[in-house]
Image (cartoon, rainbow, N blue to C red):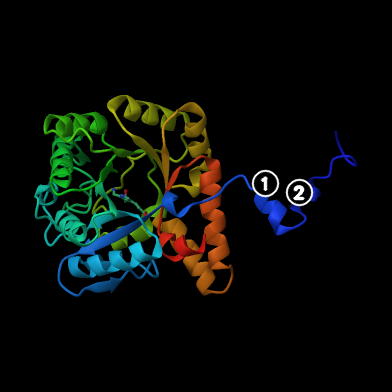
Amino acid sequence: MSFPVTRLRRLRKNKTIRDMVEETIVRPADLVMPLFVCPGKGVKNPIKSMPGNYQLSVDMMVENCKQLYDKGVKSILLFGIPEEKDEHGLVATHDDAIVQRTVKAIKKELPDLFIIADVCNCEYTTHGHCGTIVDGDVDNDLTLDTLAKQALSFARVGTDMIAPSDMMDGRVGYMRAALDKAGYYNMPIMAYSAKYASAFYGPFRDAAESAPQFGDRSSYQMNPANSDEALREVDLDIMEGADIVMVKPALSYLDIIRRTKDNFNIPIAAYNVSGEFSMVKAAAAKGWIDEERTAKEILTSIKRAGADIILSYHTQDIIDKL
Ligand code: PBG
């Protein structure tokens, strides 16, 4: 049937009928808020390139999480800025490291807040790369060992889920085996499976103080031009035991989210990264776009593309407006 019998505007004539036929709904439960913890007491450092986001010391982080939880945020992703860094990122493998201390402190006050820890070395190495350097590049297999140590420590302190973001080959299987051997067979792994070497991480590297001191991450993160390769990454991570696979960034990679959705039967996360967030904030501050409407449209588009879970810095502002 076509026009004039069919008229699609009939289903758009008022809000009630539009709501009835709405296909995609972003729920508060879909959203995860990324947060940055730093050393000290009473510290709340604004992150200049990410308005409304802060580096918070553990005490301030606990207070912040209480407010977020009351607002409806049920899940956070933690990144740490350590007091000291080393060549391999070993500072992050101890149970009293910055993120581990934070997990323990939050869990004391908010046992039901779901805490995800990002597993990577870039915040913890002096050179800012995601692993151990041999001959000017990150050595894959040496790095697996520090990553697994970090993951185990997160498990010991009561983290709810780990999210490896390093892009080393074989890391999901390596961590899964280490966790299982230690009895943590119920620890879920959300793998950053298709993580691209992206310019959109710029503001995050200020926030986490993790910019590489030489070169870039192209020898381990994916080439933005590739799509078939993303499916191979996802496939391998699933075979190695990933419980959730992630596509990152989100907006320039909605096609990758959709292909992943169409090809695999597994929950998909998408990371609406720092640069995507900061562009909205900057344009809104200039009065060029409506921040709330834009953020909702962005989150809806990521969900419509096929994501089940969205990691986004918009979470704290949007959670009670959905
Ligand atoms: C750590 C990591 C990064 C992000 C998440 N985990 C940065 C990077 O790979 O350089 C980016 C998050 C964002 O931009 O919001 N490897």
From the top left corner, tell me how far across and down residue 29 is, in percent.
Answer: 42, 51
Determine the residue positioned at 50% across, 73% down.
285
Marking on residue 11? 2
Decide which of tag 2 and tag 1 comes sooner along the chain: 2
Marking on residue 21? 1
> Type of residue at label 1?
Val
Whether ligand 1 has any atom under 8 Å from the Cβ at mark 1 is answered as no
Determine the residue positioned at 27% across, 38% down.
188
Q: Count of labels shown?
A: 2
On screen, 279 above or below 251?
below
From the top left corner, tell me how far across and down residue 183 is, in percent.
Answer: 13, 33
Determine the residue positioned at 21% across, 62% down.
109
Residue, far top: 239
Whether ligand 1 has any atom under 8 Å from the Cβ at mark 2 is answered as no
Q: Residues within 10 Å of mark 2 (few under 14, many from 20)?
A: some
From the top left corner, tell me how far across and down residue 86 is, in percent.
Answer: 11, 52
At numbered mark 1, what does the secondary structure look like: helix, strand or loop?
A: loop
> Considering depth in this image, is 286 or 174 the residue closer to the camera?
174
User: Does residue 219 appear anywhere in the picture?
Assistant: no
User: Does residue 296 appear anywhere in the picture?
Assistant: yes
From the top left corner, tell me how far across and down residue 13 is, in percent.
Answer: 78, 55
Q: CA distance from mark 2 to mark 1?
A: 8 Å
Are the residues tagged 2 and 1 within 8 Å (C-beta)? yes
Quadrant occupied by the N terminus: top right
> Type of residue at label 2?
Leu
> Considering depth in this image, is 259 or 167 the residue closer to the camera?
259
Q: Is residue 186 left or right of residue 198?
A: left
> Considering depth in this image, is 165 or 6 the residue closer to the camera?
6
Examine the image and state in which quarter residue 44 appears. bottom left
